[in-house]
Image (spheres, rainbow, N blue to C red):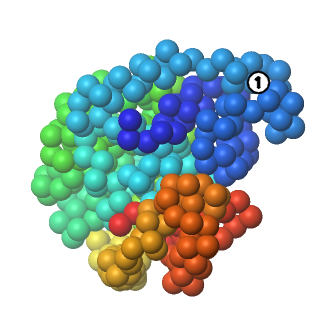
Amino acid sequence: MKEKNLPYHLALMLIPGIGIKLRRRILTDYPDLADFFNLSKRKLYSLGCNEQLIAMLKHPDWQMVERHIAWQTKSEAHHIISISDKDYPRALKYIDNPPTPIFVRGNKNILNEPQISMVGSRNATPNGARYAYDFAYHLAKSGLLITSGLAVGIDAASHQGALAAASATIAVMGTGITTIYPRDNKQLAEQIIAKGGALISEFSLSTRPRRENFPRRNRIISGLALGVLVVEAAQRSGSLITAKYALDQGREVFAIPSSPHNPMAKGCHSLLKSGAKLVENISDILQELKPQLQQQCTQTLSNLSKINNLQGDAKKCLDCIKFEPSPIDLIIQQAGLEANKVSSCLMQLELSGMVMKSAYGYQIKHEWGNQ
């Protein structure tokens, strides 16, 4: 098992009724999730859990947990990644309600590459589908990974444009990772995997298509990327939900204008009125994202340089610190060093800007990522 918390992340995922605030508190206060599952009923009551939820927490469906873990072992292309895993996408860690765990089929190593999400209508016009394909093709040629939702219409055209550019692409699913939806895109899904891309889902393996799950997955589509390009969208559509998530997450929002008589343009025009960036060609996007791409590259090189210069005990301590707060006694235990030596190393790491201290312990600063 790569990550000792994984069974507990799966158990937590399979229990209904855990709200965003409670989940966030659990992940923050209990970096070792086994401690949470071993809490007394009284303590669980104090956290806001009701009788029904406590009963489920005391008797998780470990058989279903094992089924999920068994899926991971069936192929080297199967991955289950929790938020405490080093392979978890950096961009998702700090969105509101980050998914954990995520299921990945394909190449997990591309999850941290610079991405732009492309979304739009399932009932795309021929012009809209052509725009999506062409923009995806040229953006992929320019070095951006295309992320979309595997739906028919704009999503499918965006994935196809990226593949035509000999680029990997990421499809975020609103079903379980073993259920391709719509079925018409099963061949496209297999092409994405074969060409070095990835399918992603936060839902349990057996999850069938449900209307409420597709808006929920949109926060992942936007959260993975530097920005979202809306190609065609009706006034009330999932694409506008993705754009709203993007704005809340501090991502850029781009929209392609069209004829005012086109009902599939109403959503894009609404976004443009609200301040989205008007896009006529890919340079409009690349120019806007250029500072972020340069900053990301510069920060990565700086981080690598500092990490490479770390030696001995300081490196041991850094390896024990995660994105969630790690208590100092846990760092001492895992590093195998004396308390005074760990305290000295932690001060060095904090002064260098690699870690920060909170009431719950030390954690890696989010801009460091996982080098």
Residue ID for mark 1: 54
Residue 313 percent across, percent down from the top left: 45, 72
Judged from this view, the residue extending furthest toward the top is: 63
Q: Is residue 260 left or right of residue 139?
A: right
Residue 270 percent across, percent down from the top left: 56, 60
Q: What residue lies at 26% left-to-right and 25% top-to-bottom?
A: 74
Q: Which of the 4 image quadrants contains residue 370?
A: bottom left
- Res. 248 in view: no
Q: Is residue 83 left or right of residue 103?
A: right
Is residue 176 placed above or below 197 in the rendered structure?
A: above
Counting the numbered discs, the total is 1
Q: Is residue 184 left or right of residue 338?
A: left
- Res. 103 in view: yes
Name the residue nearer the viewer: 46 or 100.
46
Is residue 64 placed above or below 262 in the rendered structure?
A: above
Q: What residue lies at 56% left-to-right and 33% top-to-bottom?
A: 8
Q: Which element is circle 1 on?
A: helix
Question: Considering the image in quadrants, where does the C terminus appear?
Answer: bottom left
Amino acid at dot 1: Ile
Q: Which of the 4 image quadrants contains residue 278?
A: bottom left
Name the residue nearer the viewer: 116 or 306.
306
Q: What residue lies at 61% left-to-right and 73% top-to-bottom?
A: 340
Q: What residue lies at 83% left-to-right and 35% top-to-bottom?
A: 43
